[in-house]
Image (spheres, rainbow, N blue to C red):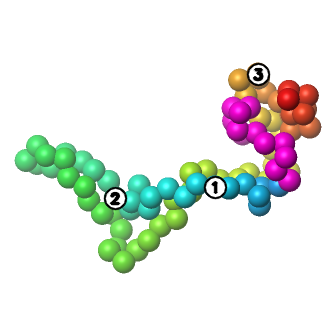
Amino acid sequence: MAAPLSTIDLSTPDGKHINIEERDEDEVLKYSGLAENGTIETFRMANPTSHAKNPAFDVTPAELITGIITEKGIVKPNELKKLF
């Protein structure tokens, strides 16, 4: 896992309490590209009735994290409190 220390909140009890930003579904349902006539066009990659979830990030279960890469180096989860 990699994260700047500014994003680590020691008061959050577990991953279920992390607010995850939901981005616009068009970021994963559409793409833009150069058309043959030289213009940029947007195309839909999915069925017109399809929808998508597009979270800004996911939450890794704590038991799977052995180290966090930060601007202070690699920190073990049980050593985080020492940095704050």
Q: Position of residue 81 (x, y in %)?
A: 90, 33
Callout 1, which amino acid?
Ile
> Residue, x 52% and y 65% (percent of image)?
53
Q: Which mark is residue 72?
A: 3
Q: Earlier in the sequence, mark 2 or mark 1?
A: 1
Residue position for label 2 = 30
Q: Which residues are magenta?
A: 1-13
Callout 3, which amino acid?
Lys
Q: Position of residue 74 (x, y in %)?
A: 79, 27
Q: Is residue 81 left or right of residue 16?
A: right
Q: Is residue 35 left or right of residue 8?
A: left
Residue position for label 1 = 20
> Residue, x 33% and y 63% (percent of image)?
45
At numbered mark 2, what does the secondary structure look like: helix, strand or loop? strand
Confirm whether the magenta stretch covers residue 73. Answer: no
Q: Is residue 63 visible from the viewing direction of this image?
A: yes
At numbered mark 3, what does the secondary structure look like: helix, strand or loop? loop
Q: Is residue 28 visible from the viewing direction of this image?
A: no
> Residue, x 61% and y 50% (percent of image)?
57
Q: Is residue 4 left or right of residue 47?
A: right
Q: Which mark is residue 68?
A: none
Q: Is residue 11 left or right of residue 7?
A: right
Label 2 crowding class (10 Å Cα cut-off): few <14, some 14-19, many 20+? few
Q: Position of residue 58 (x, y in %)?
A: 65, 53
Disc 2 to disc 1, C-alpha distance? 22 Å
Disc 2 to disc 3, C-alpha distance? 38 Å
